[in-house]
Image (cartoon, helix red, strand yellow):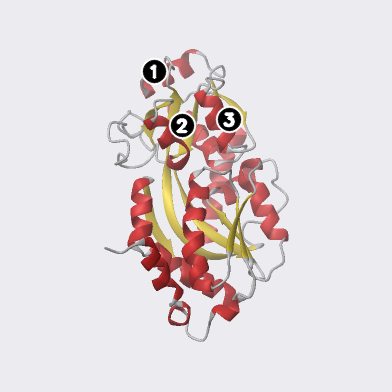
Amino acid sequence: MITRRHFLQTLSALPAALSPGLSRAAADKPIHLIVAASPGTTVDSVARFVAEPLSSIVGVPVVVENRPGAGGALGSAAVARAPADGHTLLMTGVTHFSARYSGEAAATYDPLADFKAVARLCSAALAVVVPANSPYQSMADLLAALKARPGEVNYGSGGVGSTSHLCTVILNDLTHTKARHVPYKGNTQAVTDTVAGIVAFTCQGSGGVIPLIQAGRLRALAVTSAKRWDTLPDVPTGIECGIPGFEVASWMGVLAPAKAPDRMVTLVSDGLAKVARSTEFRTFCDKQSMFVELKEHREFQASMPDEDARWRRVAELVKQS
C-alpha cells in the first residue's frame, strides 16, 4: 500500500527526471499560489491538495493564499500585477475569463495577454442547492416558483461573473425564467446564507456543499454534469430534470504572469502533471466529484483563446439578463 509519506518521498526525487536540465535550483524561493476564491471552495481544496507534493518536487515551499472577490477577478488582477519571476502563480478556473467580461473588475487585466498557462488539472460541475427546510423539493418546484414570481426568488453567488453566478444565468436562459441575483465577495458567504435561508438557492462546486448536504443542512436539487455524482447518487442531473443543455463545469488550473521565465513555467507544469497523474490525486478528485483533465503547458496555452471566446459569449447572457 502506498502511503502519502511514500508518495511525497517519491515525488521529491523527480525534478531532474521531469524536466531535463532543470533542478530545484530553478525555484530559489517560496512559490505563492494565489487562489481566486474563498477558503473551503472547490478550487481552494485543489490548491491545498497539490501544494505539498508540488513543494516536494520543486524543493521550495508552496504557500497558498486566498484572494476572493469580484467573482474571481481580484485574484487574477493581483497575479497580473505580481513580479514576473514565476514565483507568484494563480490557481483559478473559468472565472478568470468570465469575471473579466461580466464582473466588477472588468478592466483590470487581460485574461490572455497578461498570463501564461502552466497546467490545467481537473474540472468540476456544480450542484443546485437549497436550504434543508426549503419548500422546493425538486428542480420542478424551483422552476415553478421562478416562473410564477419572475425576479422575486433570490439566489446567492460568489460575485458578478463567478461560476456560481453564470450557472444560474445559464439556467434562467435555458428555462426562460428570472431569479434575483445576490452577489457576495466569495462563495463561502453565499453558501452560508443559503444554509440560513437568506437566499433561496445557489449553484456551487462540490467542495463547498457536499459536507453540508451530507450533514443535512443543504438539499441538492440537481447537478450540472452529464452524469450523476458518486457522492450524491440520488441527485439527478439537470438534463434528467428536463433541462436540455444544462451542463456547467469549471476547470481548475494554474497560470503565471505573461513574462514569467519559461524555465519556471516548465518546472511547475511538469511537477503539477506528475501530481495530476498520481493515484492520490485521482482518488481526491473522485471523492470531490471532480474529473481529472490534465493539460500541460503547451496544450493548456493553446486552449486559452477558445476559453476566452466561450466565456465572452456567456457574458453576453449576463448583460441580457
In which quadrant of the rendered image does the N terminus lie?
bottom left
* Dots 2, 3 in contact, CB < 8 A: no
Residue 321: mark in rendering: 3
Few, some or many C-alpha atoms within 10 Å of disc 2 (few <14, some 14-19, many ≥20)? many
Residue 171: mark in rendering: 2
Q: How many marks?
A: 3
Seen in the picture, residue 292 relative to 244 is either above or below; the reply is below
Q: Upstream in the sequence, badge 2 or badge 3?
A: 2
In which quadrant of the rendered image does the C terminus lie?
top right
SS class, disc 1: helix
Q: Residue shown at 32%/40% (left/top)?
A: 229
Q: Upstream in the sequence, badge 2 or badge 1?
A: 1
Q: Position of residue 317 (x, y in %)?
A: 56, 37
SS class, disc 3: loop
Judge depth for marks 3 and 1 and give the one in front: 1
Tell me if I can see residue 303 in this picture. no
Q: Residue shown at 52%/42% (left/top)?
A: 40
Q: What amino acid type should be assigned to the residue bearing mark 2? A: Leu
Q: Position of residue 2 (x, y in %)?
A: 30, 64
Q: Position of residue 152 (x, y in %)?
A: 56, 16
SS class, disc 2: helix
For the residues labelled 2 and 1, the Cα–Cα distance comes to: 14 Å
